[in-house]
């Protein structure tokens, strides 16, 4: 075996191995295999049997200087900047960004959250921190940032689902189905969303709008759903008519309303409101013009009755 056994020499009085004239052991001890070759080289170097390569001193000085600089950069917090600078100039600078899944969120807003400066290295780029910044955008529900070497970033997002517009006073917001506010209303296709008005409307809207969907012809004419006292609904139609639904029995009231409109064209008449809050009657409010015409017509009837019939001679 070639294992080094300290304390075993060529003769009885042989001394144990030494490094720089210092004994390394006493008694019987086997040096681990991984340390045997380095110890032999150091021992030979100490005994003058081994000569260091040329320029080894310069090389060791350079290593020392580099190590000192790297350690100083680490202590000063500049290590990341040095890595970024070196790797960016060796072909790893981010020069392409792919954004997938955004519809309501601007790509400019996403790029702004990436915080790229033109010389950002893909190697030193913190993808997780960028993902967290993107996730703070109003419409973003889930975000993922992936490095594609050598110089591409891929951003995938899933956006929150808009359910309706909610008006409180002068403020108009886009909300989710659970009532959570996504962002202020910004126009575009958002104008096609149902408009909810009043406190408490978002909480009750999903169930109520499901009832309205049973009557497509009526649903297409509704421009606003007004929650009154957080107890009942008013419907604002496209021709200006307001339908006042009862607090209880919404399903029956909607069925009666659609039936009367189908049979008698109720919602196409010159009226201002249909009041269905009373269970035993329906009250129709005329527009000012229709009320004036009706009053004039009623005033004409007594005059017509007072006229005497003409006698022929």
Image: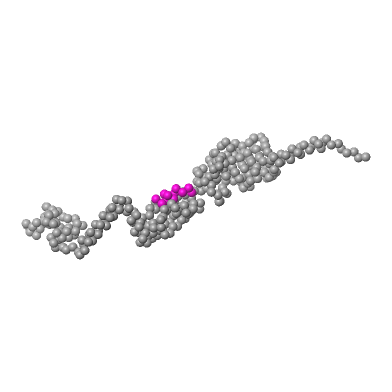
- Horizontal and vertical percent position of residue 175: 52, 45
Q: Is 27 on the left or on the right of 191, as rendered?
A: left
| Residue located at (49% from left, 53% from top) | 106
Residue that protrudes farthest toward the left in the picture: 13
* Pick the front one: 217 or 81: 81
Question: Against 272, is 75 above or below?
Answer: below
Regarding residue 205, the answer to whether it shows in the image is: no
Magenta span contains residue 137: yes
Depth check: give the residue in front, 52 or 49. Answer: 52
Residue in the picture at 55% in, 41% down = 168
Which image quadrant: the C terminus?
Answer: top right
Q: Closer to the camera, 111 or 14?
A: 111
Quadrant in the picture for residue 198:
top right
Q: Quadrant of the N terminus?
A: bottom left
Q: Residue furthest right?
A: 313
Q: Residue at x 42, y 57 (%)?
A: 153
Q: Position of residue 186 (x, y in %)?
A: 53, 49
Q: Quadrant of residue 93?
A: bottom left
Q: Is residue 47 left or right of residue 120?
A: left
Residue at the bottom extreme of this rendering = 54
* Magenta stretch holds residue 54: no
User: Can residue 116 be seen?
Assistant: yes
Number of on-image labels: 0
Q: Position of residue 310 (x, y in %)?
A: 88, 39
Q: x%, y% of residue 6?
A: 13, 55
> What residue is at 43 percent from the left and 56 percent from the top?
154
- Which picture quadrant has residue 22? bottom left
Bounds of the magenta segment = 129-139
């Amino acid at each position: 075996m070639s294992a080094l056994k300290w304390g075993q020499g060529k003769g009885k009085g042989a001394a144990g191995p030494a490094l720089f004239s210092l004994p390394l052991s006493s008694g019987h001890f086997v040096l681990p295999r991984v340390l045997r070759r380095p110890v032999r080289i150091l021992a030979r170097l100490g005994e003058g049997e081994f000569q260091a390569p040329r320029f080894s001193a310069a090389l060791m000085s350079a290593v020392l200087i580099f190590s000192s600089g790297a350690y100083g950069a680490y202590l000063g917090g500049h290590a990341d900047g040095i890595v970024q600078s070196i790797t960016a100039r060796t072909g790893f600078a981010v020069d392409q960004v792919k954004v997938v899944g955004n519809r309501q969120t601007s790509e400019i807003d996403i790029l702004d959250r990436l915080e790229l400066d033109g010389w950002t290295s893909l190697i030193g780029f913190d993808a997780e921190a960028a993902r967290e910044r993107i996730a703070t955008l109003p419409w973003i529900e889930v975000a993922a940032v992936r490095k594609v070497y050598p110089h591409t970033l891929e951003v995938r997002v899933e956006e929150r689902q808009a359910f309706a517009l909610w008006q409180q006073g002068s403020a108009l917001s886009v909300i989710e189905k659970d009532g959570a506010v996504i962002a202020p209303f910004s126009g575009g296709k958002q104008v096609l969303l149902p408009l909810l008005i009043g406190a408490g409307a978002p909480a009750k809207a999903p169930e109520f709008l499901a009832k309205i969907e049973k009557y497509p012809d009526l649903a297409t004419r509704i421009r606003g759903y007004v929650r009154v006292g957080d107890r009942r609904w008013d419907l604002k139609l496209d021709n200006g008519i307001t339908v006042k639904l009862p607090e209880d029995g919404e399903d029956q009231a909607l069925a009666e309303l659609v039936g009367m409109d189908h049979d008698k064209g109720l919602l196409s008449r010159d009226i201002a409101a249909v009041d269905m809050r009373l269970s035993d009657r329906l009250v129709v409010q005329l527009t000012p013009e229709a009320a004036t015409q009706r009053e004039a017509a009623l005033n004409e009837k007594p005059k017509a009755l007072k006229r005497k019939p003409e006698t022929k001679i």
